Amino acid sequence: MAQSSIAAAGAVVWRDGTVAVAHRPRYDDWSLPKGKLDRGETVPQAAVREVAEETGFDVVLGRHLNTVRYCVGEAAKQVDYFAARAIGGHFEPNDEVDELRWLPPAQAAAILTYPQDVAVLAEFTRLPAETRSVLLVRHAKAGKREDWHGPDSLRPLSAAGKRQADALRDLLPLFGAERMHSAPPERCVQTIAGLAGDLGRTVAEEPLLGELDYSGDPEAGRRRLLELVAAEGTPVICSQGGVIPGLICALAKQSGLDLPEVRAKKGSLWVLSFVHPGPELVAADYYPSPLPKP
């Protein structure tokens, strides 16, 4: 008989040098906020929702920390944890959590009930809490080249690509999307145009981060991305398959970061985390297209 599985998500929620630790009266334990995914929900969406429900705080997600696996009865449970900066809210006791403490990480580790939570917190403290994110998106699906008779740069998103763009529109704000940048092709601009409208932003064109210019001078493209890191606010950059893997590999090599295979499927997202000085790339997390499966 196949073992059932439970997907869940949680976070190390931080502010001003402290992290949030929750007491759950049902289990009489101290733990990091977490909970099961709702039907059709992505892991990042679940993490943000569960933190809000358990702690009352709104958060912006940063880097992925750990994936914890254990058994609950006959079911295998998997919990993905993120670093999450608290940006507002207040705690009120509820059915799940009756007490919330904001503690320095060492004190929090001392009262956490479960070793796996201590390990997640250790991964959080391995790097500075304050990082800068770049949300690097591969454009969503476009119509087939053979069916398009105009310039390739004007080839628009397909119906499936528009659905991918809508899904990214929900996903990217969870990571604090603020500024919108895109390679010149229409399919790149269209992928993030809806979110730009939601945020009241325009999409800035970035030729150096498109395949045409990048292929001639990859170093210029890398420098341009680092310029965007240094500016205020979290940038969304929509680019192409001929740019993203090489660009990430170059940044990782420069920073001494060992990465597995760098994928870039259409409609996917890389959350790149940087620290200063440098800026130095310290983490790179890949999320496939969030388009719900039919």
Image (cartoon, helix red, strand yellow):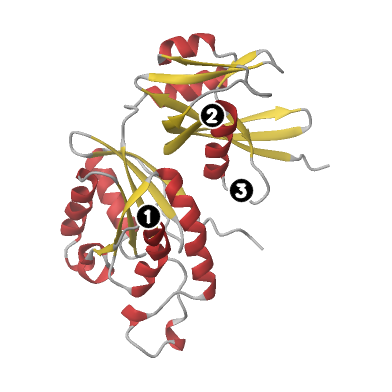
Q: Is residue 65 visible?
A: no
Report crowding for label 3: few under 14, some 14 to 19, many 20 or more residues within 10 A (C-alpha): some
Q: Secondary structure at mark 2?
A: loop
**Disc ID at residue 56:** 2
Distance of mark 2 from mark 1, alpha carbons? 24 Å
Task: Look at the image and tell me in which quarter the C terminus lies.
Answer: bottom right
Distance of mark 2 from mark 3, alpha carbons? 20 Å
Q: Specify which label sits upstream in the sequence, 2 or 3.
A: 3
Question: Which of the 4 quarters of the picture holds residue 263?
Answer: bottom left
Q: Secondary structure at mark 1?
A: helix
Q: Residue at x 20, y 68 (%)?
A: 213
Observer-nearest residue: 96 or 119? 96
**Residue 97 relative to residue 205: left or right:** right
Q: Specify which label sits upstream in the sequence, 1 or 3.
A: 3
Observer-nearest residue: 141 or 159? 159
Question: Which of the 4 quarters of the picture holds residue 186?
Answer: bottom left
